[in-house]
Image (cartoon, rainbow, N blue to C red):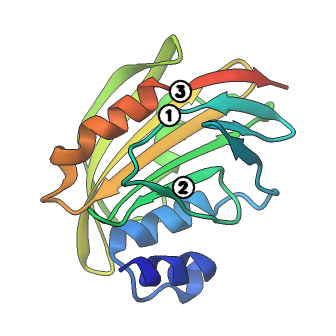
Amino acid sequence: MREKVFFIIGLSLIFLMGSCSATKFLVNYASGDDRKSGKMKDWVYTTERNSYRVEPLSQDWERVPIEGGDIVFYNPVSDLMLTVSSLCTDRDYDLQTLSDSLVVGLGKKRIKLRKDIEVDGAVGLYTEYEASLSDENFALATVVHKSPKCDYDFSYSAGPADFKANLGEFIDFVSGFGEIWAK
């Protein structure tokens, strides 16, 4: 599966045909931004527009290089993915609009749970979905958060059977997020 994931990440979404649907979704989601990638050191991600820290993950997770987006982590043992992306602009969308925009490309999705969640001392919006892509089912959790200068979104996907078992690691990951600076 590891070779398949790295192969898929290297291709554009148009050519994605051989991966599980959760991986397809997250590669599409994370590659929606065409700006140059930032740099990550000691769990701090920095671009020209902002810098933030994320909660360190266990050794089961590896960072996957991808163009666009910010950070993608893959757990080959459990076939799970986590993403973090940011966009620093003057637009001012509410959290529900930001959350809904993350799943626009999914034709089949159903919200299972939506609630407020604390992210970096402010309100974020947590949403769980049952979804499918190319007739493959998966579970998806997203969190959106706004700072005064940037919008941040996080996602976690897994097969329906593995979703709840690994959800705590995603929640810990989001809880460890902190914006360092933004312009």
Residue projecting furthest to the front: 59
Nearest-to-viewer mark from 1 and 3: 3
Going from the N terminus, do you reach mark 2 or mark 1 first?
2
Q: Is residue 77 left or right of residue 4?
A: left
Badge number at residue 107: none
| Quarter of image, res 29 | bottom right
Badge number at residue 72: 2
The residue under label 3 is 177
The residue under label 1 is 144
Residue projecting furthest to the left: 161
Which SS class for mark 2? strand
Which SS class for mark 3? loop
Quadrant that contains the N terminus? bottom left
- Percent position (x, y) of residue 76? 35, 66
- Percent position (x, y) of residue 70? 65, 50
Callouts 2 and 3 close, C-beta under 8 Å: no
Distance (Cα) linking label 1 and label 3? 12 Å
Distance (Cα) linking label 2 and label 3? 15 Å
Which residue: 54% across, 28% down? 145
Which residue: 71% across, 21% down? 180
Under mark 2, the amino acid is Val
Which SS class for mark 1? strand
Callouts 2 and 1 close, C-beta under 8 Å: no
Under mark 1, the amino acid is Val
Q: Is residue 161 left or right of residue 130?
A: left
Nearest-to-viewer mark from 2 and 1: 2
